[in-house]
Image (cartoon, rainbow, N blue to C red):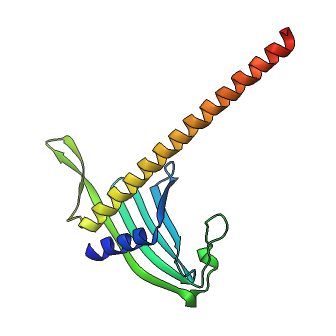
Amino acid sequence: MEELLEALEALERLGAEWKARRVSKKFLFDTVECIALVQTAEGESVIRGLVGVQRWDGYCRTKIEVVCYLDGQLDDKGAFKHARHPKDKTVKIFEYEDEVLYKYSKVLGVGLGWRPAGVVPEEHDFLVGFSEWLIIKADADKKATDEETAAVADEHREENEGKARRALFG
């Protein structure tokens, strides 16, 4: 757990901002992907952090990677094509992957819900909580942006209606 926290703190010190997106919810797995990209201060490389959480009834997989792409450069939009980067200039700094199986508990025919089949590592719980926090934050930011956009659109519509009335009725 200590290495995981150190990797996340290192990304934060470099100024990385996490962006979360729900990859799929309608299909078999509910998948959340959280990505952080940052260009090093010297401009020599790109550091990429990836947290992925896949869930399904009875199953949950978590994964985190922190990768350094030597001689990498972010483009004007702040994106990076990591799949096209040469493998010999790619260094994995930190990697963790875990799978947890759940079983449905029943007592005297009454269902109690899904329970872990074994011990759940604290790293797994941390990554699930981290991804949930990021996706809630991303949803709140999107909602605020949508509300702001709707308010601006309403304002423009009212202005245009006022101009049209003045033009029509003088």
Residue 20, position as x, y percentages in the image: 48, 56
Which residue occupies the foreground of this view, 100 or 36?
Answer: 36
Quadrant assignment, res 126? bottom left
Q: Residue at x 59, y 75 (%)?
A: 82
Residue 165, position as x, y percentages in the image: 80, 13
Above/below status of 89 relative to 159: below
Above/below status of 134 relative to 118: above
Q: Residue at x 24, y 65 (%)?
A: 122
Residue 119, position as x, y percentages in the image: 20, 65
Residue 45, position as x, y percentages in the image: 55, 81
Q: Residue at x 56, y 41 (%)?
A: 145
Above/below status of 145 relative to 72: above
Q: Is residue 6 left or right of residue 72?
A: left
User: Would you say residue 54 is visible in this rendering?
Assistant: yes
Q: Is residue 108 left or right of residue 90?
A: left
Q: Residue at x 64, y 32 (%)?
A: 152
* Residue lying furthest left: 108
User: Would you say residue 59 is visible in this rendering?
Assistant: no
